[in-house]
Image (spheres, rainbow, N blue to C red):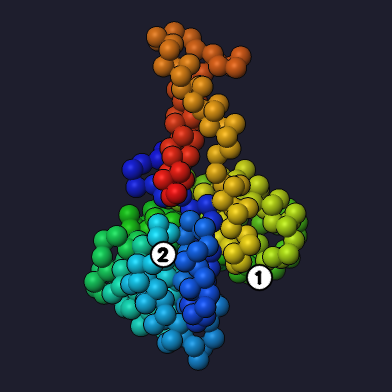
Amino acid sequence: MSIDATFRPRRSVLYMPSSNERALEKAKTIPADALILDLEDAVAPDAKASARENAVAAVASGEYGAKELTIRINGADTEWHADDLRAAAAVGPDAIVVPKVNSASAVQSLVASLQAAGAPEKTKLWAMIESPYAILHAEEIAAASDRLTVLVLGTNDLVKELFIDHVPGREPLMTSLQLAVLAARATGKAILDGVYNDVKNEEGYAAEVLQGVQYGFDGKTLIHPAQVPGANSGFAPSEEAVASAEGLIEAWNSGNGGVVTYNGKMVESLHVESARRTLAIARAIADLG
């Protein structure tokens, strides 16, 4: 996937319980690329209404700097969904995150609901892929609407529905992870890896971030602020990668149409495109400040 002018880094995407006003205040200073102001899993049923009000107030405040602000609403099969969607659409966050999206028709229905609720054009849809059925239809889901810009892996739900366990290396999830990335790349959408649950296991978390990078994810969803630095560094091009990309492009531009080599390897246009993507990501991250 090439990088266009609308590209935003999403290395670290932190879930924040909207029922916790102190957490929302603290989030203003956390260096995450994006926040998911959560109305779903992290909020008890009797706190749903107040959490909705808090999330709307946070988006309206304008106090979160360059962070991408999203609101995760409750699923379409819940009593809170319609009110959540209307409130989120009215305040116009960068995106509305919807759990358990299982089909292209569900995407189209959500897009129609956003339009009917008056959501501004800038408010995009993020679809959570959390079931075996959604994995098997991920390409159809991703291609269902241009308003859908990001797929979010719900790996905890996937583990539950596949009747498997969380294990180091995530081998039982490998097929699901790869199919989801393939769907995102085939349709030009961004894709975020699922959460890592063992907050105190720094070594295990670092390994999973690296795995996400190697599999081609754009970033990782997080459940604790302490996980932000690891995702920010892991999903950013290294200094070596940036220097190599600059050198390769310089060699290519100096080739005058002939055979070009860099560091002893032949350079083709596909290598140049990859190098340009690396530099574009690095610039976008630098622009965050």
Does residue 68 sit above or below 6 in this rendering? below
Res 87 quadrant in image: bottom left
* Mark 1 surroundings within 10 Å by alpha-carbon count, few (fewer than 14), some (14 through 19), many (20 or more): few
- Residue at 65% x, 47% y is 210
Q: CA distance from mark 1 to mark 2?
A: 34 Å
Q: Amino acid at mark 1?
A: Lys
Element carrying mark 1: helix
Residue 98 visible in the shown view: no
Residue 176: image x %, image y %?
60, 55
Residue receiving disc 1:
160
Q: Amino acid at mark 2?
A: Tyr
Residue receiving disc 2:
64
Residue 130: image x %, image y %?
55, 66
Residue 142: image x %, image y %?
42, 55
Element carrying mark 2: loop
Residue 244 visible in the shown view: yes
Query: Quadrant of the image for the N terminus?
Result: top left
Residue 227: image x %, image y %?
62, 60
- Residue at 45% x, 49% y is 289
User: Which of the pair 150/231 is nearer the observer?
Assistant: 231
User: Which of the pair 38/109 is nearer the observer?
Assistant: 38
